[in-house]
Image (cartoon, rainbow, N blue to C red):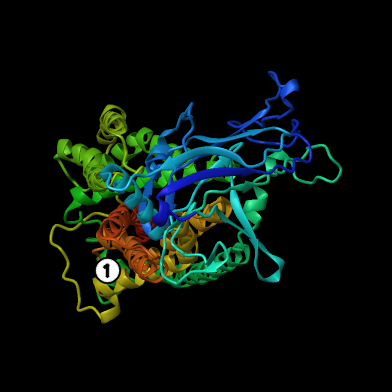
């Protein structure tokens, strides 16, 4: 056949089954939320097993475009009795649109050359021309299928070097290459658009209690996960991060156990007259707890950062336990959103308590900014990206009802909980400082290049980013290259290493600045570790130009729009870690020195 010559397309399906045996229940451990499905012959089907094997289709996506599209918009064969399984919030936010397919499988029944549907396009019809143009666009951008059977993705497995097997999403029915011959006649090597109208499917199903079978139902995802040869790189990433942590830990230990201990002993032994001639971090004891400028904004950032930190920790912990595995579609995003909504109380409490410690009195403004500022920026960015998706007709566009539901969660649950947390935070007394603050600010001496604010902040983000950049590569691959991400154990370990690295790097630089008698540490401690987000953005730009093949203005705007959301969240998260580590350190060292 030839689409351009006859404009008549037959979509046939060649179904060839090699069914070894049937599924039965397995005794392997599996976490709640999913259960195995047993299959049997039609004459034995009932409550315990089913004979029909349903094939579902998901949206099509491409590595050359950020815009996914629903299966049905490509004018493929459709299921007469179309049904859509219920989708959770995470699936909707990620643009998943699952629907039943016209391809019907019956257990232990081989089917040969079955016609599914017929398509014809009339020359001169605007509607048919629009459909064909959209099909050509899908061919040009190499859109790929995502088919699902028994909650398992159908993949294309092929061999690579060293005997490894790699699994990738199914190739699309759409192709922009021309065959070398047609009906045994050579064709000119010019670009052409083709549709693959035959699918040869071989479905192998194994019995769980067979002695030849070592794959249990709970481990059935392993063939996909093991086929991704990233484990060695992951361990390299972990070892690289551990080396950085050991280096920083050694530096901090040397400061805490040797230099700092000697400083404290010397400060406590010298006479007050000799102390006037001393230099070092003790000399700024009367100014080190002087409230920072823009204390309102800093307290709001810290409240939001605390909310993000707790949300991230719980989400990754549950993912490590298997509750948020790839089998639970959309569970990761759903869990993160629900936790963020429910964690408004810690955000309000931390922001209000710190703002009161800074001496602030505009508590109404503080609680409103905590509840609305950062979430409002994220929602505004998200809404603008969604408008682009709406205009482009992408399946990733969030329905209006879902947007209303998100706003209801925000203003109906998160905002009231933030007010509750702020109420208790303002009722608590201000955090007591170990030393008094002088009325007249101390003059800061001339600083060297490395102890000036900007160089210190820029250097502070390098080591934390060095711990995560390899893991960041896989996360970006899962988002933009549509690769499955499953390494939550590695990710949780990197998360812990990031906490340690941000804390130690910030404490280290804070000590050097205090020794140089620069007591402006409040904002600097937040920005030092928060600058890691700037390196994340730079890496995202590098990833876009060097790794991706994205074309088109809409896809480019969407990429950087969503990247800015990730950068803002990461900035608040890392900045909060550095601030509280430094806050603990400063309170600790000034509580053990004698000050008249």
Provide the residue designation for mark 1: 283
Task: Specify the farthest residue to the top.
Answer: 47
Q: Quadrant of residue 581?
A: bottom left
How far across and down, in percent of the image, does residue 84 sit? 46, 30
Report whether 68 appears left or right of 125: right
Q: Position of residue 451 (x, y in %)?
A: 28, 75
In the depicted view, which residue is nearer to us: 404 or 118? 118
Viewer-nearest residue: 172 or 414: 172
Which residue sits at x=73%, y=37%? 28
Residue 588 in the image: x percent, y percent?
39, 56
Left or right of 462 on screen, residue 14: right
Q: What quarter of the picture does the C terminus occupy?
A: bottom left
Q: Is residue 105 visible?
A: yes
Viewer-proximal residue, 186 or 429? 186
Front residue of 394 and 422 = 394
The number of numbered badges drawn on the structure is: 1
Query: Which residue is painted at 32% across and 32% down in the image?
Result: 402
């Amino acid at each position: 056949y030839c689409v351009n010559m006859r404009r008549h397309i037959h979509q046939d399906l060649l179904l060839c089954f090699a069914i070894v045996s049937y599924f039965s229940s397995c005794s392997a451990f599996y976490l709640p939320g999913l259960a195995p499905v047993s299959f049997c012959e039609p004459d034995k089907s009932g409550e315990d097993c089913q004979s029909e094997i349903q094939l579902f289709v998901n949206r099509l996506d491409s590595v050359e475009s950020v815009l996914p599209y629903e299966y049905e918009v490509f004018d493929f064969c459709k299921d007469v009795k179309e049904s859509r399984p219920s989708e959770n919030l995470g699936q909707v936010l990620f643009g998943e649109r699952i629907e039943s397919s016209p391809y019907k499988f019956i257990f232990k029944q081989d089917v040969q050359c079955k016609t599914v549907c017929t398509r014809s396009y009339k020359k001169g019809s605007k509607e048919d021309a629009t459909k064909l143009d959209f099909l050509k666009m899908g061919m040009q951008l190499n859109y790929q299928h995502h088919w699902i059977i028994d909650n398992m993705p159908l993949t294309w497995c092929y061999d690579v070097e060293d005997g490894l097997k790699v699994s990738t999403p199914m190739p699309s029915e759409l192709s922009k290459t021309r065959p070398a011959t047609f009906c045994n006649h050579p064709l000119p090597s010019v670009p052409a658009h083709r549709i693959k109208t035959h699918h040869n499917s071989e479905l192998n199903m194994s019995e769980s209690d067979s002695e030849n079978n070592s794959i249990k139902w709970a481990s059935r995802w392993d063939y996909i996960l093991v086929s991704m040869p990233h484990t060695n790189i992951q361990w390299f990433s972990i070892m690289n991060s551990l080396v950085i942590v050991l280096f920083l830990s050694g530096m901090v230990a040397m400061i805490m156990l040797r230099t700092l201990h000697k400083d404290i002993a010397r400060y406590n032994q010298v006479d007050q007259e000799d102390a006037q001639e001393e230099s070092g971090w003790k000399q700024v004891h009367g100014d080190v707890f002087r409230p920072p400028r823009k204390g309102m904004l800093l307290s709001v950032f810290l409240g939001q950062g605390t909310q993000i930190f707790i949300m991230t920790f719980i989400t990754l912990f549950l993912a490590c336990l298997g509750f948020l595995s790839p089998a639970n579609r959309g569970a990761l995003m759903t869990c993160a959103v629900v936790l963020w909504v429910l964690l408004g109380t810690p955000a309000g409490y931390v922001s209000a308590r710190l703002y009161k410690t800074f001496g602030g009195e505009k508590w109404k403004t503080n609680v409103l900014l905590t509840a609305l500022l950062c979430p409002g920026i994220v929602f505004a960015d998200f809404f603008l990206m969604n408008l682009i998706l709406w205009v482009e007709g992408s399946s990733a566009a969030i329905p209006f009802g879902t947007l209303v539901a998100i706003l209801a969660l925000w203003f109906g649950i998160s905002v009231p909980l933030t007010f509750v947390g702020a109420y208790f935070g303002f009722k608590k007394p201000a955090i007591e400082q170990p030393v008094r603050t002088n009325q007249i600010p101390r003059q800061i001496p001339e600083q060297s290049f490395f102890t000036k604010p900007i160089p210190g902040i820029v250097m502070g983000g390098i080591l934390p980013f060095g711990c995560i950049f390899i893991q960041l590569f896989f996360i970006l691959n899962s988002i933009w290259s549509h690769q499955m991400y499953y390494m939550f154990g590695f990710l949780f370990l990197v998360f812990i290493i990031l906490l340690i690295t941000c804390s130690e790097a910030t404490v280290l630089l804070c000590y050097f600045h205090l020794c140089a008698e620069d007591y402006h540490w409040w904002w600097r401690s937040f920005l030092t570790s928060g600058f890691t987000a700037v390196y994340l953005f730079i890496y995202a730009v590098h990833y876009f130009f060097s790794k991706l093949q994205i074309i088109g203005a809409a896809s480019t705007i969407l990429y950087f729009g969503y990247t800015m959301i990730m950068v803002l969240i990461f900035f608040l998260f890392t900045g909060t870690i550095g601030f509280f580590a430094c806050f603990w350190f400063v309170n600790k060292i000034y509580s053990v020195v004698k000050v008249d």
